[in-house]
Image (spheres, rainbow, N blue to C red):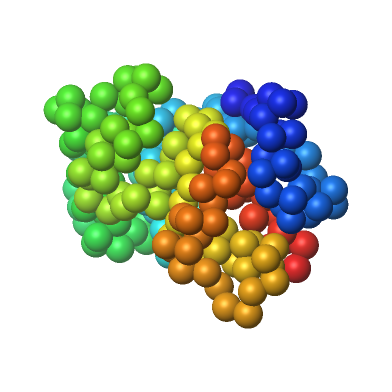
């Protein structure tokens, strides 16, 4: 599990006094990835992320559970077995055509070697983003979430994330949510713990 050192956390507080004050009432940073994410394979995590895009949690969970149930055994079929499932069967689980094709493309990238999942741990953040966004249905945000919550990278700033933007709006007392560019500039002070600060923005939103 990736976690910042006490020295790094002190430096983060010093770099952003407003965040330091907010942290007094926020839960302690738990480290990345959490226990549930750690148990999932990279394939499972990415497939799940595709299914969950732009859907409410309960609906996405139901569809993903049905997708997993299309084959025998626990969990999602391995990529090579997943590719044997016809598109109409995938659609019967509740997947949209775009998501079904995205999952097929992900499995294809894995099976033909274009996406070597085991090697992602040793790639730079940008290399991981470049490899993942070459897959249909995976954009920069999904790749960044994978970097943070699955690979445990501590210095990723998802500038297009509305939750992070809203957290910064509350933190800085802004009338309007900052733009992606404004978040990028403001978040530079959080390096090398921009993932950690982003997680704190989510918690600030949770507090209302």
User: Depth check: 5 or 204 in front?
Assistant: 5
Picture coordinates of residue 127, whole percent (x, y): 29, 32
User: Depth check: 58 or 203 in front?
Assistant: 203
Q: In the drawing, does residue 164 fall left or right of residue 92? A: right
Give the total of numbered labels: 0
**What's the residue at 54%, 51% (across, down)?**
187
Picture coordinates of residue 191, whole percent (x, y): 54, 39
Taking the view exactly as shown, the residue that stands out farthest to the left is 112
Above-or-below relation of 52 to 84: below
User: Depth check: 147 or 44 in front?
Assistant: 147
- Quarter of the C terminus within the rendering: bottom right
Would residue 65 be seen by someone viewing this image from the given angle? no
- Quarter of the N terminus within the rendering: top right
**What's the residue at 74%, 34% (across, down)?**
10
**What's the residue at 31%, 52% (across, down)?**
139
Taking the view exactly as shown, the residue that stands out farthest to the bottom is 175
Q: In the drawing, does residue 199 fall left or right of residue 65? A: right
Q: In the drawing, does residue 52 fall left or right of residue 128? A: right
**What's the residue at 34%, 50% (across, down)?**
140
Picture coordinates of residue 12, whole percent (x, y): 67, 39
Would residue 79 be seen by someone viewing this image from the given angle? yes
Above-or-below relation of 119 to 9: above
């Amino acid at each position: 599990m990736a976690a910042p050192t006490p020295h790094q956390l002190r430096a983060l507080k010093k770099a952003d006094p407003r965040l330091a004050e907010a942290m007094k009432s926020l839960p302690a940073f738990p480290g990345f990835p959490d226990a549930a994410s750690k148990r999932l394979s990279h394939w499972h995590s990415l497939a799940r992320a595709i299914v969950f895009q732009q859907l409410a949690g309960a609906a996405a969970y139901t569809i993903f559970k049905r997708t997993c149930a299309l084959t025998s055994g626990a969990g999602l079929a391995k990529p090579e077995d997943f590719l044997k499932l016809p598109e109409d069967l995938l659609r019967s689980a509740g997947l949209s055509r775009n998501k079904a094709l995205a999952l097929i493309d992900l499995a294809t990238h894995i099976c033909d070697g274009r996406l070597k999942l085991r090697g992602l741990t040793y790639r730079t953040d940008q290399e991981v983003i470049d490899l993942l966004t070459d897959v249909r249905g995976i954009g920069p945000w999904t790749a960044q979430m994978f970097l943070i919550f699955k690979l445990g990278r501590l210095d990723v700033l998802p500038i297009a994330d509305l939750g992070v933007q809203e957290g910064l709006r509350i933190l800085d007392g802004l009338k309007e949510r900052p733009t992606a560019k404004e978040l990028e500039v403001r978040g530079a002070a959080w390096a090398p713990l921009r993932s950690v600060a982003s997680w704190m923005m989510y918690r600030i939103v949770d507090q209302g």
